[in-house]
Image (cartoon, helix red, strand yellow):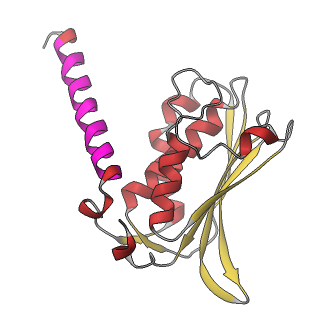
Amino acid sequence: MDPEIKLIQEQVHRIRLIVAKLLQFARPQDYVGYLEPVAPAQLFQDSLVLVGHLLKRGTITIDQHLDCGREVLCNRNELQQVLINLMVNGIQAMPEGGTLTLATEEWDEADMPLGLKLIVGDNGPGIPQEDQARLFQPFFTAKKPGGTGLGLWVSLSLVERCGGSITVDSAAGRGTRFTVWMRFEPLALDRVQ
């Protein structure tokens, strides 16, 4: 097959996926998706494979702490989309190399187990305080090439649909740590409008 035609077919497929994701995001009640028990350690490993091409470009090491044995009931593809987005952001924050930290922790409150925390951290330059308040707004970018400013906004929306949240801890010169807070089971899906 001619390389140009193959490239055109790949890009048409990519456009179809983008349109499908936009429809899924615009009308989530029509695309709730299949929920299944997800082991976060395996999900991190699968996500690492998908960002492997980015890891090969620089000298980035992976520091993993995936000891939490808890599982969450969620849409696996959506949670993987969130993790990949956070991992890509972390990798892009360290163009000269660094350490990408991946961790899972138990989420308990008042000695009651609520779920788990999925953590993606980097030791890049950090995010200025004035930008942190706008990170999850649509079309806000850190001026990285090719960024649309939609990744964190979509990620937060996907996690909030399940009753979770995403928080950020960052300071200039000490990197950034994103924490995805996931409940064992989603809150009532009928609240999705």
Q: What's drawn in magenta, residue-wise?
A: 5-25
* Residue at 26% over, 23% down: 11
- The mark tally for this picture is 0
Asked if residue 170 lies left or right of residue 19, the reply is right
Mostly what secondary structure, the magenta segment?
Answer: helix
Is residue 151 found inside the magenta-colored segment of the image? no
- The spot of residue 15 in percent (x, y) is 26, 30
Residue 129 percent location from the top left of the image: 81, 42
- State the residue in front, 118 or 12: 12
Tell me where residue 95 appears, x and y as whole percent.
68, 24
The picture quadrant where one finds residue 74 is bottom left
Which residue lies most toward the right here?
173
- Residue lying at the far front in this picture: please name it: 193
Tell me the residue at 48%/68% (across/down): 39
Name the image quarter holding the N terminus.
top left
Residue 70: name its quadrant. bottom right
Nearer to the camera, 189 or 96: 189
- Is residue 21 depicted above or below 116 in this figure? above
The residue sitting at 72% across, 28% down in the picture is 97
| Residue 10 on the magenta span | yes
Residue toward you, 18 or 104: 18
Q: Nearer the viewer, residue 100 or 113?
A: 113
> Where in the figure is residue 106, as x and y percent of width and height?
66, 75
Quadrant in which the C terminus appears: bottom left
The image shows residue 146, relative to residue 187, as above or below, that is: above
| Placement of 40 over or under 126, stated as above or below | below
186 to the left or right of 35: right
In this view, the residue farthest toward the left is 1
